[in-house]
Image (spheres, rainbow, N blue to C red):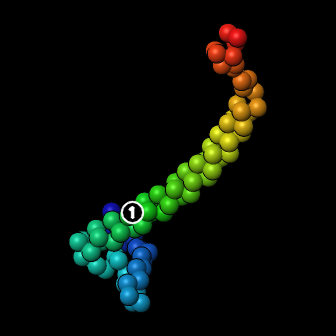
């Protein structure tokens, strides 16, 4: 059985303007790189969620304004008890 060495594609990370092939780095460096990428992705997801929640808040404020106006227009004034007795 012949063992063929699989070609590993380089994974470049740019740090302070310099490029590094992460395949050539220590396991500790690779772990830090993977975690940094994961953290950047999570931050991006949170930013997207914030934007979505801000849009939802605006939509809810519009709906609340509509309901409050509809309530004001539909509510009837109740006569005071003193005026009804006279």
Outermost residue to the bottom: 17
Q: Position of residue 78 (x, y in %)?
A: 69, 20
Q: Which residue is mark 1?
A: 38
Q: Please name whichever residue, 86 or 17, is drawn nearer the observer in this view of the structure.
A: 86
| Above or below 54: residue 33 | below
Residue at image position (52%, 54%) is: 49
User: For the N terminus, which image quadrant?
Assistant: bottom left
| Quarter the C terminus occupies | top right
Residue 3 appears in which quarter of the rendering?
bottom left
Say left or right for 53 vs 29. Answer: right
Residue projecting furthest to the top:
85
Left or right: residue 28 versus residue 2 is left
- The image shows residue 61 at horizontal and vertical percentages of 63, 45
Q: Nearer the viewer, residue 77 or 29?
A: 77
1 relative to 8, above or below: above
Please name whichever residue, 3 or 62, is drawn nearer the observer in this view of the structure. 62
Q: Is there any visible trace of residue 43 in the rendered image?
A: yes
Q: Residues within 10 Å of mark 1 (few under 14, many from 20)?
A: few
Q: Secondary structure at mark 1?
A: helix
Q: Horizontal placement of 63 versus 43: left or right?
A: right
Residue 60: % across, % down: 62, 43
- From the top left corner, tell me how far across and down residue 19 is, in percent: 40, 86
Residue 4 seen by the camera:
no
Q: In this view, which residue lies farthest toward the front?
A: 86
Query: Which residue is drawn at the image coordinates 71% and 33% (left, top)?
Result: 72
């Amino acid at each position: 059985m012949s063992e063929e060495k699989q070609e590993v594609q380089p994974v470049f990370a740019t740090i302070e303007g310099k490029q590094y092939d992460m395949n050539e780095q220590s396991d500790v460096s690779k772990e830090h790189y993977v975690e940094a990428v994961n953290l950047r992705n999570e931050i991006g997801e949170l930013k997207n969620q914030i934007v979505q929640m801000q849009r939802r808040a605006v939509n809810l404020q519009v709906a609340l304004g509509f309901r409050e106006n509809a309530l004001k227009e539909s509510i009837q004034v109740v006569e005071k008890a003193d005026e009804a007795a006279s």
